[in-house]
Amino acid sequence: MHLVPVLPGNGSFIHGISEKLSGSGVKVGKFQADGEQKPFAQEELQLGSFPTILFFPTHSSRPIKYPSERRDVDSLLAFVNALR
């Protein structure tokens, strides 16, 4: 499963989440969805606002949007575990 936060310029969040989810089977990446990538983000990922956190489960061909505004590790991990 992959977790991709679409966050403009928030590297410390990505680094913190990546460290805390290390060993959980969740890969963390960052996608900058503005500029040249904006049409792709809007059309292919159905993103309309930022920040957005997307999960790409290995069993699904489409991403799943994280539905909460809570950005702490425990909340993210609970959501990931519910999808497994």
Image (spheres, rainbow, N blue to C red):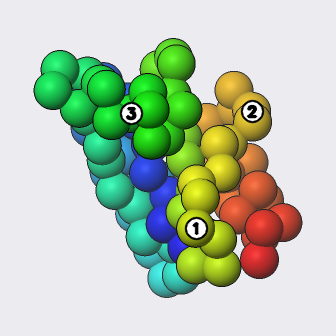
Q: Distance between the Cα atoms at labels 2 and 3?
A: 19 Å
Q: Which residue is mark 1?
A: 61
Q: Disc 1 vs disc 2: Cβ atoms closer than 8 Å?
A: no
For residue 59, side relative to residue 42 (left or right)? right
Residue 71 versus residue 17 in the image, above or below: above
Residue 79 versus residue 23 in the image, above or below: above
Indicate the quadrant where residue 37 lies. Answer: top left
- Mark 1 closeness class: few <14, some 14–19, many ≥20 residues within 10 Å: few
| Amino acid at circle 2 | Ser
Q: Secondary structure at mark 1?
A: loop
The quadrant the C terminus occupies is bottom right
Q: Nearer the viewer, residue 23 or 43?
A: 43
Q: Residue at x 34, y 56 (%)?
A: 29
Q: Distance between the Cα atoms at labels 1 and 2?
A: 22 Å
Q: Distance between the Cα atoms at labels 3 and 1?
A: 16 Å
Circle count: 3
Q: Which residue is mark 2?
A: 68
**Residue 82 visible here:** yes
Q: Nearer the viewer, mark 1 or mark 2?
A: 1
Q: Which residue is mark 3?
A: 41
Q: Residue at x 17, y 20 (%)?
A: 35
Percent position (x, y) of residue 47? 51, 28
Percent position (x, y) of residue 3? 50, 58
Q: Residue at x 31, y 26 (%)?
A: 39
Q: Nearer the viewer, residue 72 or 25?
A: 25
**Residue 21 visible here:** no
- Mark 2 closeness class: few <14, some 14–19, many ≥20 residues within 10 Å: few
